[in-house]
Amino acid sequence: MKTIVETQLLSERSRALSESETLAMTKKARELAAQGHKVISLSVGEPDFQTPQHIKDAAKKAIDDGFTFYSPVPGYPELRQAIAEKLTKENNLDFTAENIVVSTGAKQSIANVLLSVVDPGDEVIIFAPYWVSYVEMVKLAEGTSVIVTGTIDNDFKVTAAQVEAAITPNTKAILFSSPCNPTGSVFTKAELTAIADVVARHERIIVIADEIYEYINFGDKHFSIGSIAAIKDRVVTVNGFSKGYAMTGWRVGYIGATKAIAAACDKLQGQVTSGTCSIAQKAAYAAITGPNDAAKEMSAAYLRRRDLVIGLLKEIPNLKVNVPQGAFYGFPDVSAYLGKSFNGVVIKTAGDLAMYLLNEGKVAAVGGDAFGAPNCLRISFAASDENLVEACRRIKDCLAKLQ
């Protein structure tokens, strides 16, 4: 009897997807650590702070109060209302609870939107460097990613002129993050206004603004492109609780969108996961309605760590380093080290360099290939000062060994 090759049973969709490079590198780092190596992991995009106590207390109370049943698909009404009020007050977005859909993390929120608005053949303009999952999500929606790349000389930010040049009759959406993962770049009000002016001339285009790092901003007050009147009805604002509140494991994200898009995401989510965890939602409500002191303290710590890490990276010969204005990543250009070798093995890509640093220096970073920036390396500074100093020392030593 013939045996079917196991992979032949898989769908084309699943076979076409790439594994998340950040999660893959984190997995490899954990494997080395399990073998007894002292690995410093700077690969995962996760705050190293504990969730604030009042948020954890709210979750405990929710359990005691019996919130152990299915939650409404788009989220508890009081949480959606609180989110709408937050977006109205802090972001100048005119939303009510009907415009809000709560999901199991901002990642699901973005996937919901793309699956709700993108048809086969539609193009999605993605600003590069980009978060690793954007392209794969567009692939799942059977759309086509159109990559527009910002340069390090412009803090990796795409210009309005570049956006205009990338638009075709098939363009359906524009997707970007600010503050940006992986670069830490933050678009200014003027830069977003210029992009909005372009979008305003193309009535079919939807903007998906990923603002998950909103509270980790080292410059001017965060500005939301959805607050620009000319395009506000065509902007989906994505946010969540993972980064600003150190709630990565709680898995709560959300969108603010027109009622039509919100309803489509509600319908889609109802067939996939239904409502997000009831306990996590009660914790999220405490976070968004409670004191924001912890978020400000964490942001201040990230700023101090940024200055520490960027200063140390600038001491490494031939690294090209800019200064991120938000999030918690450094994104140095390592092209001067590509093509060099160690023990006869040539470092061809930034991914190769990341693997070399892990194996030789026991430092986990992520190659920029997965972010649409093959000459760069993403280094998270969501770690202790001691580990950051030691990691940068190891990176410097490892790079010095390349011939």
Image: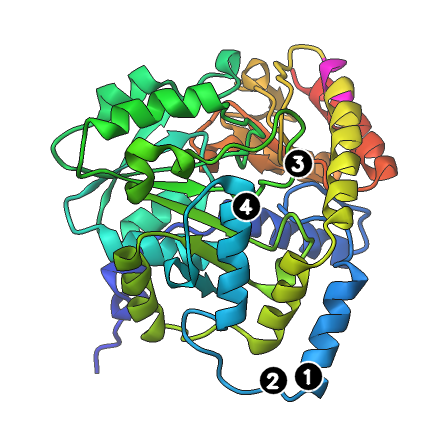
The answer to which of marks 4 and 1 sits earlier in the sequence is 1
Q: Quadrant of residue 386?
A: top right
- For this view, does 96 lie left or right of residue 245? left
- For this view, does 336 lie left or right of residue 390? left
Amino acid on which the number 3 mark rests in the picture: Phe
Residue 278 visible in image: yes
Residue 104 visible in image: no
- How far apart are the two marked residues, 2 and 1, measured between alpha carbons? 6 Å
Image quadrant occupied by the N terminus: bottom left
Question: Which of labels 3 and 2 is toward the front?
Answer: 2
Question: Which of labels 1 and 3 is toward the front?
Answer: 1
- Residue 63 disc label: 1
The answer to which of marks 2 and 4 sits earlier in the sequence is 2
Circle 3 sits on which residue?
A: 328
Whole-percent x, y for residue 8 in the image: 26, 66
Question: Which of labels 4 and 1 is toward the front?
Answer: 4
The answer to which of marks 3 and 2 sits earlier in the sequence is 2
- How far apart are the two marked residues, 3 and 2, measured between alpha carbons? 34 Å
**Relative height, residue 147 to residue 66 (above, below):** above
SS at badge 4: helix
